[in-house]
Image (cartoon, rainbow, N blue to C red):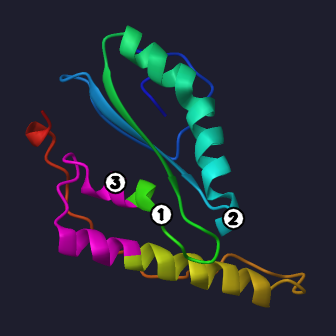
Amino acid sequence: MFPPEKVTTSKRPDITVYSPSDKQGIIIELTVPAEENLAQANLRKKMNYEDLIQEGQEAGWELKYFPVEVGSRGFTNNTLRNCFSFKFFGLTNKETKKALDTVARTALRAIYTLWLARNNRHFVNWELVNRPYMRPLDLSKVE
């Protein structure tokens, strides 16, 4: 959640990374629509978080908002690439490509798992991938 002492909201973005000392933050909201609905999903998410971004900026925060979409059949559009290549994350082109491939494969495996379990009354959450190691973010490099 965005720091409640800075902005009071009931919205709960998927990922929030912020530095209280620098008053900077990133908000990422993921949507997994059917590929034909990517543009509509992006617009809906932008509108849904417009107030939160504006309130944060009015409170003196510098916020970057990324509504990202991954198609339910594994298509990743430019919103996710832009998020990964943003200077805050510091991913190289090679790391960005690998991350996009991992996201696409995970989406495909997830939808396939759901399809296989469509008639299973005892379906439980199955681990689709091993969680990758993620290097810690260096917040001092954010301008």
* Label 1–label 3 contact, CB within 8 A: no
Q: Quadrant of residue 45?
A: top right
Residue labelled with disc 1: 77
Q: Is residue 4 left or right of residue 45?
A: left
- Secondary structure at badge 1 equals loop
CA neighbours of label 3 inside 10 A, class few (<14), some (14 to 19), many (20+): few
Label 2, label 1: how far apart the Cα atoms are: 12 Å
Residue type at the position of mark 1: Asn
Residue type at the position of mark 3: Asn
Label 1, label 3: how far apart the Cα atoms are: 9 Å
Residue occupying the point 34% across, 28% down? 63
Residue type at the position of mark 2: Glu
- Of the numbered discs in the image, which one, if any, rests on residue 36? 2
Q: Is residue 112 left or right of residue 6?
A: right
Q: Is residue 96 left or right of residue 10?
A: left
The verdict on residue 26 being magenta is no
From this viewpoint, is residue 4 visible? no
Q: Quadrant of residue 6?
A: top left
User: Start and end of the magenta stretch?
Assistant: 81-100
Label 3, label 2: how far apart the Cα atoms are: 20 Å
Q: Earlier in the sequence, mark 1 or mark 3?
A: 1
Horizontal and vertical percent position of residue 7: 47, 16
Horizontal and vertical percent position of residue 76: 48, 68
Instruction: Work out whether residue 126 or residue 28 is closer to the camera in this orientation and state it.
Output: 28
Vertical placement of residue 5 versus 84, above or below: above
- Of the numbered discs in the image, which one, if any, rests on residue 82? 3
Residue occupying the point 67% across, 75% down? 125
Q: Taken as a whole, is the magenta stretch helix, strand or loop?
A: helix
Q: Is residue 53 left or right of residue 30?
A: left
